[in-house]
């Protein structure tokens, strides 16, 4: 699990299984994109986002709205998918774009800077580009791993 912002963390499915670690990291709520894990004291939203498939805009809109709502309530949120690479990085980038007004590419650069393993799959990246009407070649995203660090 890595902190993108004080209010936004990114992680993988195994992070959602360690309740004591979540509490130690002051995680108040989770957006789960791989499988649903429930705790009575850590609310969560599970969205059935398929790995490596294009994002459904309604699920993207719902997830980003959830992240922003939690931030506005001063809750620290963990966004987690299976490996913490593809889907979670896409949702974190989308949230940064909407919350901070960053370009989509600057948002994914920021996510990658804080969580180096971040790499949305090409179909996921193209979905984000279409959703935000910000075309950016996928090769530029792939190059981030070589230009950062």
Image (tube, helix red, strand yellow):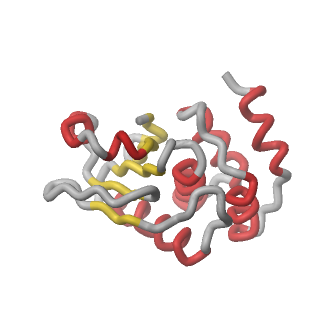
Provide residue 64's location: percent of width, then percent of height.
Answer: 49, 65
Is 19 situated left or right of 30 in this image?
left
Provide residue 96's location: percent of width, then percent of height.
Answer: 55, 53
The answer to which of 143 and 121 lies nearer the viewer is: 121
Which quadrant would the N terminus be assigned to in this image?
top left
Provide residue 91's location: percent of width, then percent of height.
Answer: 54, 56
Which quadrant would the C terminus be assigned to in this image?
top right
Is 113 situated left or right of 103 in this image?
left
Q: Residue 5 falls in which quadrant of the image?
A: top left
The answer to which of 132 and 38 lies nearer the viewer is: 38
Q: Residue at x 59, y 31 (%)?
A: 116
124, above or below 23, in the image: below
Q: Residue 111 falls in which quadrant of the image?
A: top right
The answer to which of 33 and 114 lies nearer the viewer is: 33
Q: Residue furthest bottom?
A: 58
Provide residue 42's location: percent of width, then percent of height.
Answer: 21, 54
């Amino acid at each position: 699990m890595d902190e993108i912002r004080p209010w936004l963390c990114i992680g993988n499915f195994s992070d959602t299984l360690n309740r004591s670690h979540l509490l130690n990291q002051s995680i108040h709520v989770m957006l789960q994109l791989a499988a649903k894990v429930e705790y009575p004291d850590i609310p969560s939203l599970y969205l059935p986002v398929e790995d490596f498939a294009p994002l459904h805009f309604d699920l993207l809109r719902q997830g980003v709205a959830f992240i922003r709502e939690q931030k506005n309530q001063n809750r620290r949120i963990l966004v987690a998918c299976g490996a913490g690479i593809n889907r979670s990085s896409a949702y974190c980038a989308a949230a940064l774009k909407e919350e901070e007004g960053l370009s989509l590419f600057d948002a994914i650069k920021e996510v990658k800077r804080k969580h180096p393993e971040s790499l949305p799959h090409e179909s996921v990246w193209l979905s984000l580009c279409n959703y935000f009407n910000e075309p950016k070649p996928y090769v530029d995203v792939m190059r981030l791993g070589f230009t950062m660090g």
